[in-house]
Every structure is written in C-alpha cells, then in structure tokens.
C-alpha cells in the first residue's frame, strides 16, 4: 500500500467515504491510510463529540455537526445550548454545515438568545438542515434560520409546530432582533412539505416573501414528498435548477396548473419517478407535463431519476411507450435549447435479479429509444446507482456519524 501513488490512495478514500464503517475498518487495517482518512472520518460528527477530550486533535477536520436525540441508556444528554457555544470558528475552521434531526420543541426551547448569538458568529456556516423537528411557531423557525449570517443552503423536512397550549406554556424569548429584511438569502432550498401542519404553508410563504425570493437558484421538492404544490407554487422567477417528483394522477397531490408559467429561467430540470410497476400514472403524466406544464425556453438539461424499490422483471422499470412519447415531445421546437438528457436508474441492494448485466441492457435500450434526440445532437447519458436508501436532498444526510 505504501508504494501506491498518492492520487490512487485519494481515490480509494473518496470511494469509501460514502460508507463510513467500511472506511473506518479499512483505515484501522492499513495504518498507511489512517492519516489520510482522518479528514473524511471526522468530517461529520455528532454535537456531543465536540465536548470530548479525545476529539480535540481532530476538530480541524470537522465540516458538519449534527444534533439528534441521544439514547439516555448509552449517553448522558448534554444541553444543546452548551454545545453551541463550542462552535467557535477558531477551533472549527472548516465547519460549514449544521444539522438538527428529530428534536422536539422541549429539546430546543432551552436555546435562548445567547445561544442564537453564538450561531450568529458562525460566518463559515452556509448549510442548515432541519429534519423531523417540532418548533413552537414560525418565529422559532426564523430564529434558527436567520441567526446564521451567511446561510445559502436550507433543507427542511417534516417540520411541525407544537400544540398551541404547549407553545404558550414553553413560551421563551427567542432572538431579540430578527433581520427579516436582509435574511435569509437562500440559494439552494430543499423543502419536503407536510400538509398535516400549518408549518409548511407558513414557512413557504415567509421564504417566498423574504430576500430568498430573489436569491433562490436551486429548488428541490424531494422524491418522497407529497403535495409538492405547497412549495412549488410559492416560487418561480429566480429558479434555474428545479427538482420535483411526479408520482400519480391525484390532482390534489400534483395541482401543477398555472404556476409553472412563473418558472421562466429553468436551465436544468430533474424529475423523480417511481418504476413503472410501482406507479403507472406518473409515467402517463410525464410526456404531457413536459409538453404543456413546464416552460423550456432556457432548459438545457433534463434528468429523469427513476427509483426502483422492487420489481420482479426488468421490463417493469420503464414505461417504454411513455418514453417514446417523451422522445417525440423533446424533439419539438419548444425544446430548442436542450443539450442533454440524462436517465438515472437507482435501485436498492435487494433486487431479485443480477443488476450489473441486466442494468447494462436496460440502459442500452433507453438510449435506443431516445435515438431521435441523439441524431439532433442532444447528448444522451444513462447511468444506474445501487443504493441502500434513496437519498434525495440537496444537503446530504448520509449515515455513519460519530
């Protein structure tokens, strides 16, 4: 291993970085890799790790800190506000992302204005993830988002509000002054709506009226989201990179009528799809959506991202008749700016057939069906990924945190 070029060692580490247990095991087995791997092993850590003495030599490698509920049987809960005061630029020079996962409002009401002041000192933090969180109200959400002065990427997933009676009981001062005129200026937003709570509509409406309305460049409604119109209907003119799911024919889920006229600057469009055997209606919608709903005057790249949860036969992945219609639609004058079409097939590990050879045949067949576009000079790209879970947020939520 010591004789390998540094470039090859670097590639080995990058290949393993998405599987932290494998990276950790490899590094411990081969001591030559360990010094080079530390940068990856300690890039993402849990908040409580920052308080441990053994962690001090590795703080310079930390890129992201995550806060999540702890198991009282295995660890002693540490107040979040105590950890936040350890997020100082001088000891975490590479820190650029904060993630809060699955915390209820009683976990975070202890974050008083002084702690938000600590967040305001983190000029290097540009990414914030709030997932499975329960807040007191909109102002509580705004306190998190607006405390970070240079926030550019925001990921919101399953955000809810506490019961109003509990919110009154736990009413605490949040941020003394919220600068809502200049913050937030989000450039990348991933927003998974939850229509069972008023939080989705209130937060989306606030962001749409904030400086984000002008700064937003990339908007994603994840593959797993229901009722995407609650987010998509709020934005439009500034968005250049758009990601959205097409799942079925339920008009209440997909009410795409009208508001896509505001999306006039989209240069890349990614559409998340289920495999044909799981959702035939979405494939029926796809050609009509491209032809009538979405503007294409600036569209240069189209990506169709197919998620294969389970199929018994390879032919069940794609609706070939629908793909033929997509080819015909994209050959039209409306898509004169189109330069690339990419079809991605993501499948989980437990498929009943041999993925490697079968997927190669599947991708070749997809390319054959898009022959017309290829003849017109449009680049056709096909690829498949084998994954453990479908990660579909702009800000990665890979497992394996210390």
Image: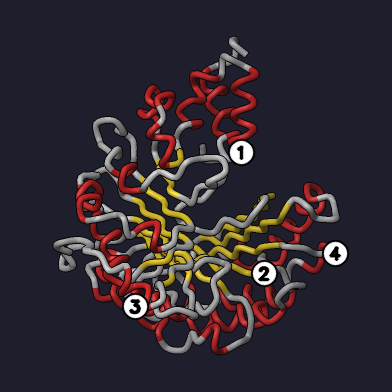
Mark sitting earlier along the chain (1/2): 1
Indicate the position of residue 136 as horizontal and vertical percent values: 34, 69
Q: Is residue 377 visible?
A: no
Indicate the position of residue 65 as horizontal and vertical percent values: 40, 43
Q: CA distance from mark 1 to mark 2?
A: 25 Å
Mark 2 or mark 3, whichever is nearer to me:
3
Mark sitting earlier along the chain (4/3): 3
- Residue at image point 32% right, 65% down: 141
Residue at numbered disc 2: 274
Q: CA distance from mark 3 to mark 1?
A: 37 Å
Mark sitting earlier along the chain (3/1): 1
Residue at numbered disc 4: 312
Residue at numbered disc 3: 202
Give the crowd class for mark 4: few <14, some 14-19, many >=20 residues within 10 Å: few
Residue at numbered disc 1: 19
Total numbered circles = 4
**Quadrant in the rendering for residue 272:** bottom right
195 or 249, which lies in front? 195
Q: Is residue 50 above or below residue 349?
A: above
Indicate the position of residue 91 as horizontal and vertical percent values: 29, 30
Q: CA distance from mark 4 to mark 1?
A: 28 Å
Mark 3 and mark 1 residues within 8 Å of each other at the beta carbon: no
């Amino acid at each position: 291993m010591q004789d390998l070029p540094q470039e090859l060692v670097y590639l080995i580490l990058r290949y393993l970085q998405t599987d932290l247990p494998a990276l950790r095991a490899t590094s411990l087995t081969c001591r030559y890799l360990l010094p080079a791997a530390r940068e990856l092993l300690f890039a993402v850590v849990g908040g409580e790790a920052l308080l441990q003495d053994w962690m001090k030599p590795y703080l310079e490698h930390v890129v992201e800190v995550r806060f999540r509920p702890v198991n009282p049987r295995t660890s002693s809960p540490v107040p979040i506000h105590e950890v936040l005061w350890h997020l100082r630029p001088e000891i975490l020079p590479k820190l650029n992302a904060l993630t809060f996962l699955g915390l209820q409002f009683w976990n975070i009401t202890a974050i008083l204005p002084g702690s938000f002041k600590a967040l305001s000192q983190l000029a290097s933090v540009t990414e914030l993830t709030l997932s499975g969180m329960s807040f007191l109200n909109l102002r509580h959400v705004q306190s998190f988002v607006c405390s970070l002065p240079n926030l550019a990427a925001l990921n919101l997933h399953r955000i809810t509000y506490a019961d109003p009676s509990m919110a009154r009981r736990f009413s605490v001062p949040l941020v003394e002054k919220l600068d809502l005129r200049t913050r937030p200026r989000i450039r990348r937003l991933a927003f998974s709506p939850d229509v069972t709570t008023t939080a989705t509509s209130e937060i989306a409406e606030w962001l749409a009226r904030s400086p984000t309305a002008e700064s937003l460049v990339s908007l994603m409604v994840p593959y797993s989201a229901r009722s995407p119109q609650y987010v998509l209907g709020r934005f439009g003119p500034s968005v250049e990179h758009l990601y959205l799911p097409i799942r079925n024919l339920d008009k209440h889920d997909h009410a795409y009528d009208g508001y896509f006229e505001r999306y006039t600057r989209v240069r890349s469009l990614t559409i998340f799809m289920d495999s044909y055997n799981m959702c035939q209606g979405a494939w029926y919608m796809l050609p009509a959506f491209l032809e009538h709903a979405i503007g294409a005057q600036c569209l240069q790249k189209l990506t169709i991202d197919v998620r294969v949860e389970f199929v018994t036969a390879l032919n069940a992945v794609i609706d070939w008749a629908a793909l033929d219609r997509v080819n015909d639609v994209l050959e039209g004058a409306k898509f004169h700016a189109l330069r690339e079409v990419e079809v991605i097939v993501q499948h989980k590990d437990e498929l009943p057939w041999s993925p490697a050879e079968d997927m190669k045949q599947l991708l070749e067949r997809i390319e054959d069906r898009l022959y017309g576009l290829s003849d017109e000079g449009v680049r056709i790209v096909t690829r498949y990924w084998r994954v453990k879970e479908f990660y579909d947020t702009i800000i990665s939520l890979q497992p394996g945190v210390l």
